[in-house]
Image (cartoon, rainbow, N blue to C red):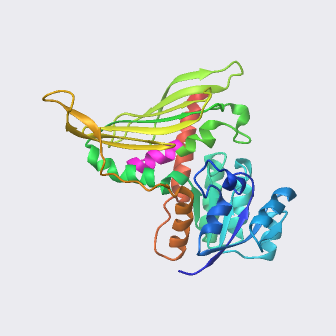
Amino acid sequence: MRTYTAAIIGVGRIGFSLGFDKKREQPASHTMALKNNKNIQLVAAADKDCEKLKNWQKYVKGGKIFSSSEELYGSIHPDIVTVAVNEDSHLEECIKAIKARPKLVILEKPVALNSAEAEKISACSKENGVPVMVNHERRFSADYVAAREYLPQIGTLQTIRGELYSGLRIYGEEFEKDGAYSLLHDGTHLVDIIQFILGEELAKPVVTGVYKDEKNAVRNFTASFSTPKCSEIQVAMSGRSRFFSFGIDILGTEGRICVGNGYAKFYKRQESKLYTGFFSLSKDKAVKLPKKTGYFSGMVKNAVDFLDGNAELKSPLSVAIQDIKVLEEIKEQLK
């Protein structure tokens, strides 16, 4: 392995400060994940906020700071550029990053505010020969990877239900300009990880259970899908909960998988301890998961392995664009 230089555009929460959250599994930000990889030298950052830049520079000794991405690209030519700005700046900053011709661009999810913007990023990527990977972090998380690998052991799939509960509005047309709604911000994770585990694309949702508040913002919905592997798939979201919860429940004819924030449970069919002549589901004690999921560090490792020519990108731009298109199909029925 060789060493690659990296620069980061945007040193806010996901770019930097979440790396100091003592309750989160670390690394929990792009800065910490890049800095912790022995094959990456983090050399620079750009942000409009001078105080954030100064704090970043105190942590990344020797790192250069710039007030804009243009200044950064005019001074250095990193191998990796991470774009960790707000959603409404993804299109502009990602295209600037691509045109700077690094070996790889890492783009924070969601790709863009909509699929039209995402396709512009894709076109620029192809034109300049610069690959883009998107930080759908659960694709690199040991618990979700284990769920995907365990899937054949639970028999024929009967139902899949993905749930996301928070206090943020699900959707409102007035929020499309900045992406400040949960369907885009969080829903992209839910749709993406279901497609990742299942190995199939979701399409043609049937949306029911829509609830809107007094300001006409969507606060609840359920979208149903059907694929060749599973005839009943549901994506349910609530934006009126006083807690945050993210999880997927997969039921097969021979077992069950329950995985989400803070838990991963794998069940298989065994002779019942409760009823003679019956079978029940029991925890599969053979499944061993590491103490850390490695969700962020795994993403950066995949980037290095890709640049070394030893792996494909596990979260490529093309897949992330498909996620956005699924969300747009849902959105059309929420309006």
Dividing the picture into quarters, in which one does residue 71 lie? bottom right
Percent across and percent down for residue 40 are 62, 73
Which residue sits furthest left? 277
Residue 2's place in the image compared with 83, above or below, is below
Q: Residue, x 48% and y 61% (percent of image)?
A: 314
Q: Main secondary structure of the magenta part?
A: helix
The magenta segment is 190-201
Which quadrant of the figure contains the C terminus? top right
Residue 24 visible: yes
Residue 199 visible: no
Percent across and percent down for residue 245 are 54, 36
Report the front residue among 272 and 28: 272
Q: Residue, x 62% and y 55% (percent of image)?
A: 28
Q: Is residue 309 left or right of residue 26?
A: left
Q: Residue, x 57% and y 58% (percent of image)?
A: 296
Dividing the picture into quarters, in which one does residue 265 lie? top left
Which residue sits furthest bottom? 2
Q: Residue, x 44% and y 56% (percent of image)?
A: 290
Q: Is residue 124 magenta?
A: no
Percent across and percent down for residue 21 are 67, 50
Q: Is residue 98 left or right of residue 154?
A: right
Percent across and percent down for residue 46 are 79, 63
Q: Is residue 319 left or right of residue 67?
A: left
